[in-house]
Amino acid sequence: MRESTVTTKGQTTLPKDVRKVLGLQPGDKLRYILLDGEVRILRARPVLDLEGALKRSGQKPVTLEEMDEAIAAGAVDQT
């Protein structure tokens, strides 16, 4: 278990091994998730890092128009 001290300004220094695990560099941003009295710390990632996250091999890219059509068709099917 790692510890750090909180200053009077509410600041702390993340231990080196925590920074290493999160892949943090100076200037990186963090996100804090509160869950049942605990906090999870994540490195914030730019939206561009998500490019290709949903890509499946053999699946062709879908255009915005095709997405709109599929959404419209799904909305009609649920009425």
Image (tube, rainbow, N blue to C red):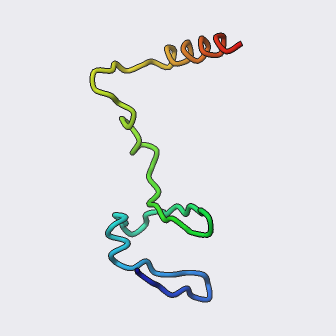
Query: Residue 21's image quarter?
Result: bottom left
Q: Nearer the viewer, residue 32 or 64?
A: 32
Query: Residue 53's image quarter?
Result: top left
Task: Indicate the position of residue 24 as horizontal and vertical percent values.
Answer: 37, 66
Task: Indicate the position of residue 43 as horizontal and vertical percent values.
Answer: 44, 60
Total labels: the figure holds: 0
Q: Nearer the viewer, residue 27 or 37?
A: 37
Q: Which residue is drawn at 39% across and 69% down?
A: 26
Q: Which residue is drawn at 45% across and 84% down?
A: 3
User: Is 55 rendered above or below residue 32?
Assistant: above
Q: In this view, does 31 lie to the left or right of 9?
A: left
Query: Residue 61's image quarter?
Result: top left
User: Is 3 rendered above or below residue 25?
Assistant: below
Q: Residue furthest right?
A: 79
Q: Residue at x 62, y 14 (%)?
A: 72
Q: Which of 8 and 26 is in front in this view?
A: 8
Task: Indicate the position of residue 19 as horizontal and vertical percent values.
Answer: 37, 71
Task: Indicate the position of residue 11 as horizontal and vertical percent values.
Answer: 55, 81
Q: In this view, does 2 lie to the left or right of 72?
A: left
Q: For the C terminus, give its image quadrant.
A: top right
Q: Residue furthest front?
A: 36
Q: Residue at x 51, y 81 (%)?
A: 12
User: Is 7 rendered above or below residue 66?
Assistant: below
Q: In this view, does 7 lie to the left or right of 15?
A: right
Q: For the N terminus, give its image quadrant.
A: bottom left
